Image (spheres, grey):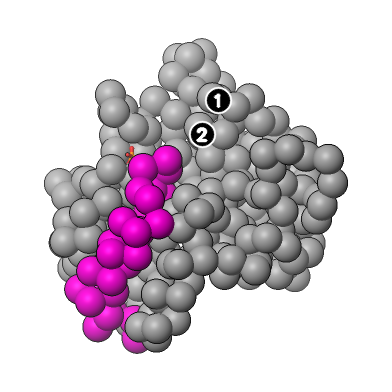
């Protein structure tokens, strides 16, 4: 029995500000009744959507948590094209995602950069969703566990145990994400989540047992129930299948029915 279940989406580089506001309006209308239950909802839109999204959520009195897709590790400086924690806080983000697979592999971000970003995000009062995941070739070589442990140990290197109540971890195997992605088998997800839980406890003791571990990568209507039923899975982090509010609502309810 889980006492909290996490359901979120990252809209990647897809929805404009206007589309995000409309999406949030629909999602809140459909899922408002879940606000007092065990479900924690979150949405991570593009930077330019954050401020209008914040206003829309506040206007509706919504508890959907608003997140940013990335963040620079300095407050200001000569970092053209980056976004500062001050700017994200001003725009109304409460959560920052760090180390998404597309940041790591399309934009070549490193574990050491993730480490600096995690530290900086905590210093500015954000919750952090650190994403980790092994690539197909690393899985074939049988080094998935090593890759995940390294990403966790470096990314969370500067986090103190008493700060872990603001840390979430998203496990997104790179080969499972996006168009052409293959959803990870539930036994595989369970095995990797257990291993990551052990790593988190090695790093933070009992506090590591409470860090939410979310699965992402081709989550859809037909696999959401089985994935969330895994003991070691605390939430679902959904891309494409969540970008229609009605479909995301159905996924969330299906998953909740599977665990309640
Ligand atoms: P998909 O659900 O579209 O595979 O995307 C997952 C993801 O990357 C969420 O961050």
- Is the residue indicated by label 2 positioned so its CB lies within 8 Å of ligand 1? yes
Identify the residue under disc 2: 101
- Residue 71 is left or right of residue 183, and the answer is right
Q: What span is colored magenta in the figure?
A: 7-36
Circles 2, 1 touching at the beta carbon (< 8 Å): yes
Taking the spot 66% from the left edge, 31% from the top edge, the residue there is: 109
Image coords of residue 102 (percent x, y): 50, 32
Instruction: Give the main secondary structure of the magenta stretch.
Output: helix
Q: Is residue 161 visible?
A: no
Of residues 10 and 201, which is closer to you in this image?
A: 10
Identify the residue under disc 1: 105
Is the N terminus in the top left, top right, bottom left or bottom right quadrant? bottom left
Image coords of residue 204 (percent x, y): 72, 59
- Residue 204 is left or right of residue 182, and the answer is right
**Callout 1: few (<14), some (14-19), or many (20+) C-alpha neighbours within 10 Å?**
few
Is the C terminus in the top left, top right, bottom left or bottom right quadrant? bottom left
Taking the spot 70% from the left edge, 34% from the top edge, the residue there is: 111
Q: Quadrant of ligand 1?
A: top left
- Most extreme residue toward the front is 18
User: Any magenta on residue 35?
Assistant: yes
In the image, residue 124 sits, relative to residue 200, either above or below, namely below
Residue 104: quadrant of the picture: top right
- Is the residue indicated by label 1 positioned so its CB lies within 8 Å of ligand 1? no
Of residues 62 and 156, which is closer to you in this image?
A: 62
Q: Secondary structure at mark 1?
A: helix
Residue 34: quadrant of the picture: bottom left
Q: Is residue 193 visible?
A: yes
User: Any magenta on residue 194?
Assistant: no
In the image, residue 64 sits, relative to residue 201, either above or below, namely below
Taking the spot 40% from the left edge, 57% from the top edge, the residue there is: 17
């Amino acid at each position: 029995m889980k006492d909290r279940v996490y359901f979120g989406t990252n809209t990647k580089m897809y929805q404009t500000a206007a589309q995000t506001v409309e999406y949030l309006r629909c999602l809140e209308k459909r899922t408002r009744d879940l606000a007092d239950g065990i479900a924690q909802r979150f949405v991570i839109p593009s930077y330019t959507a954050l401020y209008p999204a914040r206003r829309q959520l506040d206007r509706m009195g919504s508890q959907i948590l608003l997140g940013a897709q990335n963040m620079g590790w300095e407050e200001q400086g000569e970092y053209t094209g980056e976004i500062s924690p001050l700017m994200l806080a001003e725009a109304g983000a409460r959560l920052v995602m760090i180390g998404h697979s597309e940041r790591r592999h399309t934009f070549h971000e490193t574990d050491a950069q993730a480490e600096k970003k995690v530290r900086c995000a905590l210093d500015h009062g954000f919750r952090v969703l650190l994403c980790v995941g092994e690539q197909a070739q690393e899985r074939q070589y049988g080094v998935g566990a090593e890759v995940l442990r390294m990403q966790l140990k470096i990314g969370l290197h500067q986090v103190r145990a008493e700060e872990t109540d603001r840390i979430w971890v998203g496990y997104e195997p790179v080969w499972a994400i996006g168009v052409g992605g293959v959803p990870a088998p539930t036994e595989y997800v369970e095995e990797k989540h257990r291993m990551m839980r052990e790593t988190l406890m090695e790093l933070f003791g009992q506090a590591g047992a409470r860090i939410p571990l979310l699965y992402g990568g081709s989550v859809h209507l037909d696999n959401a129930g089985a994935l969330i039923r895994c003991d070691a899975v605390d939430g679902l982090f959904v891309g494409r299948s969540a970008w229609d509010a009605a479909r995301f609502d159905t996924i969330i309810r299906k998953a909740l029915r599977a665990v309640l």
